[in-house]
Image (spheres, rainbow, N blue to C red):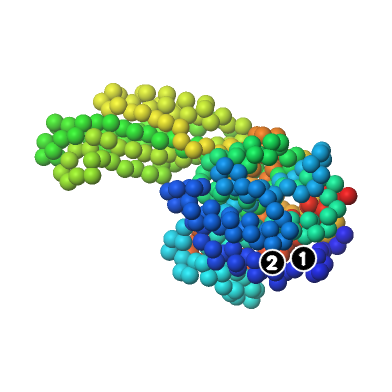
Amino acid sequence: MTRIADNELDHVELVSLTQQLVRIPSPQTELMEAEPAVQQFIAVCAEILADRGLSGRRDRMGNLLIEIGPSSADQALIIMAYAMNHPPSAMADPFSGALVDRAGQPAIRGRGVAEQKGALAAAIIAVEQAHRKGELAGRLVFALSSAGETGRHDAAASILDTLGYTPTLGIVALGTDNRVTLGNKGRLDIEIAVYGQAAHSSTPWAGINAIDGARKVLDRLEALPLGGEDHPALGKATLTCTRIESFPAATHTIQNEARLIFDRRLLPRQDPQHVFDEITAALDEIDGTWRIEARRGPFMYPCEISGEGKLFRAVRSARAAMGLPPPEPLYSHGALDAGFLVARGCEAAMWGPGRMELFHSDEEYLLVEELSLGAEDYFALIQSYLGR
C-alpha cells in the first residue's frame, strides 16, 4: 500500500469538514460535559456521520459511540475524539474556520482546530473510508467524548461501560504534531481549605487570618519532596498552586477562610492516593492555629507504553505500508484519557494532527498538510490492524 489515493481520501472534503466543525462553538463552561453547546455539537456530528452511513448511539453522558466490523473479533481498535474545546478567550474570530496562509502553506484557523477538532475531522474521514471499504476483520469503535477540557475520566469511563468491553488498542485523537505519545504525566488536583476567624482589620489581633494560614500551606508544600526518581523523558513530578480565594468578600475584614487548589503532576507508576497522603501528612505538621482540610479533586492517570509494544508496532507497520518512516515518539506533560484506557487494559496513545504549542493560543491554526497526514495515518492504522 502506498500513500492513500485521492479517490480514497477526499482532501477537499476533509478541509471543508474541519472548517464546519470549527464553526460550531463547543466551549468548556462550568457545566462541563453537560454544557448544551457541547451536547449540541455532538448531535451535529452524529448527523454528519449518519449522512455518511455511520449510525451510532448516545450514552448517559451524551457521548457518541459507533461500532463497525464483526462484534466477535478478538482485535478491536477505538479512536476517541473530543467535542469540548477551550473557550474563545482573547482569540479574534475564533469560529470563522478561515483558510489562512502560514509561511506559504494553507492552514485552517479557529478555536480548537489544533487541539481537538482537526483530529476529530481526520478521524471521521478515516472511519468513513474504512466503513466504505467494508473489509474489516476486527472491530472499529469511533467515540466522540463530551470531554476534552474537563481534566477527569468520567466521559471515558462512561464510553467503556456502555461498550461493555475494552478494545485492545486505542487512539486518543488529539493534536500531537502527528507524533505518537508513548508517555504522559498524570494529574491530581488537591483542594485545600484553611479556616481562621473573622475580625475587623483595625483589630487584627482579634481574629485569625486565613490568608496567613494559606501562606503557611504554600511554604510547607513548596518544601515537600515529591518522591521517586526523575523520569528520563518526562523529568520531575511537579506540585503547583493554581488558584487562591479568600472569604468573606467584604472590605476591612480579616479573612476567616482561604481556599487553594494545587495541581500535582504524576509520573508513570506514581500512585495518586500515596501522593495525596504525603500532602495531608505535610499539612498536619503546620501548627494548630488554623483548621486545615484537604480533599482529592479530579484525577487523570499517568501513562507509558513501549515503543516495542503492540500499538506502536501497528502504527509503524501502517506507516511502512504508506512508504513513510515511523512517527516520532512524544512524551507529554499534559494528561488526557490514554492513561485511563491503559489502566483498563487497552494499549493507547494520544496521536493526531495539530501542534501542542498552539493549544489555547490567540492564533490557533492547523496546516492542511498536517491535517491530511493525520487522516492518512488513522486510515492506514485501521487498514493495517483491522483489515482482512
Task: Give the vertical position of 296 relative to 184 (above or below).
Answer: above
**Amino acid type indicated by mark 2:** Leu
Q: Residue at x 51, y 47 (%)?
A: 33
Dot 1: within a 10 Å radius of its alpha carbon, few (fewer than 14), some, or many (20 or more) residues?
Answer: many
Task: Give the vertical position of 35 relative to 284 (above or below).
Answer: below
The residue singled out by tag 2 in the image is 14
- The residue lying toward the viewer, choosing from 139 and 346, is 139
Dot 1 or dot 2, earlier in sequence: 1
* Quadrant position of residue 43: bottom right
Which numbered disc covers residue 9? Answer: 1
Q: Residue at x 24, y 31 (%)?
A: 196
Q: Position of residue 331 (x, y in %)?
A: 63, 46
Q: Position of residue 225 (x, y in %)?
A: 48, 31
Q: Secondary structure at mark 2?
A: helix
Could you give the CA–CA distance between mark 1 and mark 2, rounded to whole angstroms?
8 Å
Q: Residue at x 79, y 56 (%)?
A: 130
Q: Residue at x 28, y 31 (%)?
A: 195
